[in-house]
């Protein structure tokens, strides 16, 4: 495999990416740095929150992916992890927290309750998916999803961040 910086993207051994300009190379470097230091804001609401906390502990070691400390302030976070059932009254508060996060920001929806309302989908007081309140970048399925699935979701988000704003030769939008 060629080690030309215009053709080689670390971590993507299957298909090298050809960047089209110097601006794209700089954007890729910035995206690479962002993708390796995603700071989460935990919005844990139910059983999914227990699995989210387990992912941060030593056994699963979320810190090896750059997401070690869950932030208590939205102004210090760039990833919101919504884990659990969102009630209708929580919607405006969830939106407010998302608006307080600095750009660029991402949202990960964890578990069936956050994704679609889960087993409470027909309740009058359950939001039918967090994507009706904030834009969601990655969905993690399960009830509740295992910590490994959350880590996989964060890795999928890293891939998405890495390609953000790039014009990659051979790809169309």
Image (cartoon, rainbow, N blue to C red):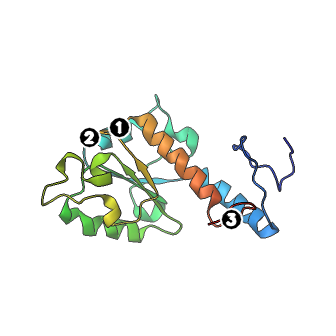
Alpha-carbon distance for marks 3 and 2? 37 Å
Residue visible at 24% across and 45% down in the picture: 46
- The quarter holding residue 20 reads bottom right
Q: Comparing marks 3 and 1, which lies closer to the viewer?
A: 3
Q: Nearer the viewer, residue 103 or 157?
A: 157
Left or right side of 114 for 68: right
Indicate whether 43 appears above or below 93.
Answer: above
Nearest the eye: 68 or 51: 51
Kindly state the secondary structure of the residue where label 1 is placed: helix
Residue that carries the numbered disc 3 in the rendered image: 166
Residue 73 is drawn in which quadrant? bottom left
Q: Is residue 92 above or below residue 12?
A: below
Which of the two labelled residues, at mark 3 and mark 2, occupies the earlier sequence position? 2
How crowded pointer 3 is (Cα within 10 Å; few <14, some 14-19, many 20+) is rated as: some
Q: Which residue is mark 1?
A: 51
**Residue 99 placement, left or right of 16:** left
Q: Secondary structure at mark 3?
A: loop
Q: Nearer the viewer, mark 3 or mark 2?
A: 3
Q: Could you tell me which residue is drawn at 59 percent across and 57 percent down? A: 161
Where is residue 31? Give x, y as percent.
Answer: 65, 59
Residue 34 shows in this picture: no
**Is 68 displayed left or right of 11 in the figure?**
left
Q: Are marks 3 and 2 in contact (CB under 8 Å)?
A: no
The residue that label 2 is drawn on is 47
Q: Quadrant of the N terminus?
A: top right
Say which of 70 and 10 sits in front.
Answer: 10
From this view, report whether residue 143 is shown above or below residue 30: above
Q: Give how far across and how far down residue 173 sits, in percent.
A: 61, 66
């Amino acid at each position: 495999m060629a080690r030309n910086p215009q053709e080689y993207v670390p971590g993507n051994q299957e298909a090298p990416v050809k960047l089209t300009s110097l601006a794209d190379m700089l954007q890729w470097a910035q995206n690479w740095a962002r993708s390796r230091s995603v700071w989460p804001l935990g919005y844990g609401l139910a059983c999914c929150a227990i699995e989210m906390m387990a992912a941060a502990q030593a056994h699963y070691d979320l810190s090896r992916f750059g997401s070690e400390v869950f932030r208590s302030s939205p102004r210090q976070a760039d990833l919101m992890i919504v884990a659990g059932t969102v009630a209708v009254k929580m919607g405006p508060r969830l939106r407010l927290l998302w608006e307080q996060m600095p750009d660029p920001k991402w949202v990960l929806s964890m578990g069936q309750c956050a994704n679609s309302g889960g087993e409470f989908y027909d309740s009058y007081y359950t939001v039918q998916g967090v994507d009706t309140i904030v834009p969601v970048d990655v969905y993690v399925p399960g009830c509740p999803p295992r910590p490994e699935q959350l880590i996989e979701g964060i890795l999928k988000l890293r891939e998405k961040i890495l390609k953000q704003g790039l014009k990659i030769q051979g790809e169309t939008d």
